[in-house]
Every structure is written in C-alpha cells, then in structure tokens.
C-alpha cells in the first residue's frame, strides 16, 4: 500500500469503475424521505419533536452519497442525524446523542457508516451514547463500501 501523508487509508484517492448502463427515460423522480431539518448532529436539538417515539438513523456524511438508494433503503420513516467522525469536532457528540436517546422514546437506532477505518468512530460513539442513556432499544450498524454496496 502506498504511504499516505495523513496516515488514513480512507483518504486515498480511488477511481470506482462502473459499467455504463443504458439510460432509462422516466418521468418518475425519486422522492426525498427526509422528514426534518436540521440534520447535522451539531445542530439537531435533543428535544426536537421528530425524535419522539422515533426510529433514528445516525449516518456518516458520505453514506448518502455512496449509497444510491439511501433514501429508500435507510432514511425512509426515520429521524436523521448526520456526522463525520473524522472531520467534525466530535467532542460533544456522545453526550448529545445520549441526551437524544434519554429524552425520547426511541424505538430503534440504525448507524450507517462507510467501510473506511476512520468512519468506525461514529459507530463507537453511538454505542457509548446508548450506554450513557441507560435505554435499551434495537441497535443496528450498516456498513457501506466505497463502491456504494452494502457490506452487511
């Protein structure tokens, strides 16, 4: 493997080869499944009404761009918080997520991360927040490859 100045293999430039598929002419546009604003974890208030009795998706920023079916496969019916464990100032993330989980009747949490090592930090932070919240609910982690395919 080539030496990377930043030391993170997730920062290595890669080209994703795709076969050209025939363009399908359609008038149907994919509908957004976003149900709230804001979505950035720094900005969402822990007491926002959309977290009440909700299924929550905590997604790494890159997931929505890599997974073409993000809205239909992951976001539909969920409240969303996005974050980047590598580039964000994540110091307050664990306590903020713990507050969200603690102050709302959360039904489930799905964590969606990329396969690159730096993204695993988001999964760790969510698990720490669940522990701090004292709540018990289903927790699932979805890993997306840089090629846009789900790894699990």
Image (spheres, rainbow, N blue to C red):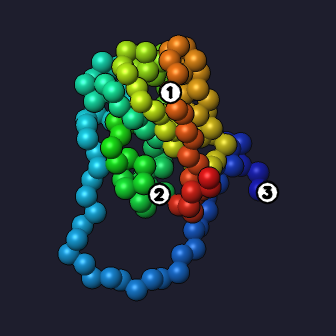
Q: Is residue 140 visible?
A: yes
Q: Earlier in the sequence, mark 2 or mark 3?
A: 3
x 62%, y 29%: residue: 124
**Occupied quadrant, residue 29:** bottom left
Q: Please, which residue is most extreme toward the left here? A: 27
Which of the two labelled residues, at mark 1 and mark 2, occupies the earlier sequence position? Answer: 2
> What label sits on residue 1 in the rendered view?
3
Q: Is residue 47 left or right of residue 8?
A: left
Residue 74 — which label?
none
How many marks can you see?
3
Task: Identify which residue is drawn at 34% across, 36% down.
Answer: 79
The residue at which mark 2 appears reads as: 67
Residue depth check, mark 1 versus mark 3: number of the one nearer the observer? 1
- Give percent across and percent down for residue 17: 57, 74
In the drawing, does residue 39 fall left or right of residue 114?
Answer: left
Q: Nearer the observer, disc 1 or disc 2?
A: 1
Quarter that holds the N terminus: bottom right
Residue 39: which quarter of the image? top left
């Amino acid at each position: 493997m080539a030496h990377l100045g930043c030391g993170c293999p997730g920062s290595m430039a890669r080209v994703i080869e795709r076969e050209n598929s025939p363009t399908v002419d359609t008038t149907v546009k994919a509908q957004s499944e976003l149900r709230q604003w804001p979505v950035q974890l720094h900005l969402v208030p822990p007491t926002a009404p959309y977290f009440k009795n909700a299924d929550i998706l905590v997604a790494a920023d890159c997931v929505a761009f890599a997974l073409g079916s993000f809205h239909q496969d992951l976001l539909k019916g969920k409240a969303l918080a996005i974050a980047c464990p590598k580039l964000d100032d994540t110091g307050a993330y664990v306590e903020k997520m713990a507050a969200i989980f603690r102050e709302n009747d959360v039904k489930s949490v799905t964590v969606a991360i990329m396969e690159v090592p730096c993204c695993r930090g988001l999964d760790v932070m969510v698990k720490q927040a669940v522990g701090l919240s004292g709540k018990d609910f289903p927790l699932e982690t979805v890993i997306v490859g840089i090629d846009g395919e789900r790894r699990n």
